[in-house]
Image (tube, rainbow, N blue to C red):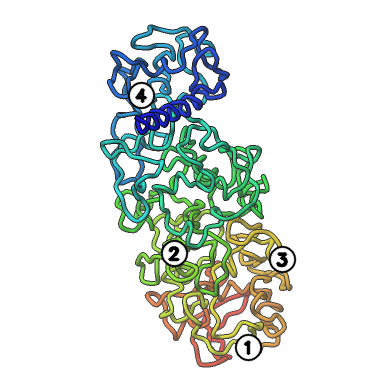
Amino acid sequence: MKRAAVLLAAGLLAILSFAAGVSDPANKHNLSVSGSGPMHASGEDEICVYCHTPHNSNPAAPLWNHALTSGVSYTTYNSSTMRATVGEPSGSSKLCLSCHDGTVALGNTVNNGNLPFTGVDAQGHMQGTSVLGTDVSDDHPFSFAPVTGSEIVLPPAGDAVKLDANGQVQCRSCHDPHVNDNDSASNKFLVKYNRFSALCLTCHQKQYWSSNPSSHQSTARLYTAAQGAHTGYTDVASNGCESCHKPHSAATGQRVLKGQEEATCGTGAGQQCHGANNVADYNIAAEFNKTYSHPTYRTTPSVHDESESPSNAIFRMPEDSPAADRHAECPDCHNPHSAYGFSATAPKAPGALSGMWGIDTNGNQVQPAGNPPSVNEYEICYKCHGDSANKPQVSGGPWPPYPTRQIVQFNLRLMMDPTNPSYHPVEAPGRNIFVPSLIFPWTTSSRLYCTDCHNNDALAGGGGPRGPHGSNYKHILERRYDMDAEYTTESATTYALCYKCHDRQNIQDDRSFKKHKLHIVDERASCSICHDPHGISLTQGNSANNSHLINLDLRFVTPSGSGILRFDDLGTGRGRCYLTCHGEDHDPETY
């Protein structure tokens, strides 16, 4: 008897604690006349009756009393990166949608008739942001059985997050309809506290998120409602996944992003984190307003897909069709679950580019590895600037005019190949071991990043965000490099990019080439007239005629009087030219 009394007392305590949640006037699921929410009954003081009934319920469990949605077809979630199949709403989700799809009056009950409500529309339907509608493709998917893998796991036994009896994710997996303040910051009826995305991480184990850890996972920078946050949390780490994702009514359905990818990162409401709202250290979005930039905001709507790869027949990258939409969006270069501040040595990509796959020197896909977990920086660049069939330079875009090279090639993977007769030392140290103009600490054994040349022009003055987002110099160059005129007056600024690594005085002292000063100072010929800065592919050139990055610009160079257009390498510091340039016929000119 004593034990029975204890059990009865425990049961009553559970009922009372349950009732305390939903009976609270501040609980939005208290739809009785005592509820303080914007929508509630006009006179009915019963609390449970809007959802439950002890008799003649439909369905029997959980003693359901609210009329169900009927005759409606739902548009469900779909994503190129989701392996599970999402079905029509079922289980508890169907019960939730009987109010939240906005097609059934809030007061429409099975056993109590149509109870009058205030705050609803003319038909008695729910209003406001709680209405999901019948298009639920912009909501976290539900009514599906998860396909587990390295990044998707089942909730552990005893966790507040649970699958239903059929092993499916339902609304009830994340939401407790009776208690709205398990997470007091959001008050969204979550089953548990979601600071640092504890609820999300129950099932979602994104690679690198915690192991790096990602800056998005760890930074305490302020991110408030005024800056675009929607959770009630006030810093980036506490917002966690929801700094970028919105589980209901997301602006972009696939992967429930708060905006189109780049809008999630840098524009939109409050300019988001990497825009003008001062969440991140720098305003990256402003870089794309410069004269020259990657087309991150010019490609609208977004055509990037997270599943892109060389083996994806639908979303192939590099693109194999000249007609394919070209794009360069934030997640083409950055993995938001991995990116963090970590330095590296060329050619290895730094932490900001960690977690991204790339294309190696042989044209094969390569995955990140090491510390930081990254590929080589140039391998990320080769995703778009290597084998892609839709490069705009082929048709003269996007920033004409271009040098008209004697050997035409726009595939940088081929131009940078270390088997080439000459190339800038990105993939490997250069072939030329005699380069007396190099400024310390550069040597003939050094390796370059692509971003040593292609970068934010403000870096030349020591400030601003790093990376080839935008520049006021053509080709997104970090410094000025004049190349489009036959006659260009030499100065420290005219060829500032070259002089970043090559000593100006050394060049003009003719220590490597006897007539450098004659050409660039006296004859006012640009470095670009003779030198192709990336390299000359072995498939088109050879070491006898294309060493030292020699690939003539035919806009300003024509054949010699005898009809020959050629450079001959005669050894260190020596050569022979057959050409006509700046009014001089070299037929040949030997030095």
| Rendered image: mark on residue 462 | 3
Identify the image quadrant of residue 75: top left
Q: Residue furthest left?
A: 166
Residue situated in front as seen by the camera: 470 or 491: 470
Q: Residue at x 38, y 6 (%)?
A: 113
| Rendered image: mark on residue 436 | 1
Cα–Cα span, label 4 and label 3: 59 Å
Compare marks 1 and 4 and give the one earlier in the sequence: 4
Which mark is in front, 4 or 2? 4
Assign the C terminus to one quadrant of the image.
Answer: bottom right
Cα–Cα span, label 4 and label 2: 50 Å
CA neighbours of label 4 inside 10 A, class few (<14), some (14 to 19), many (20+): many
Residue situated in front as seen by the camera: 280 or 526: 280
Kindly identify which residue carries mark 4: 95
Question: Circle 1 — which element?
Answer: loop
Q: Residue at x 64, y 41 (%)?
A: 224
Which mark is in front, 4 or 3? 4
Q: Residue 483, position in %: x, y?
A: 61, 67
Question: Circle 3 — which element?
Answer: loop
Kindly identify which residue carries mark 2: 382
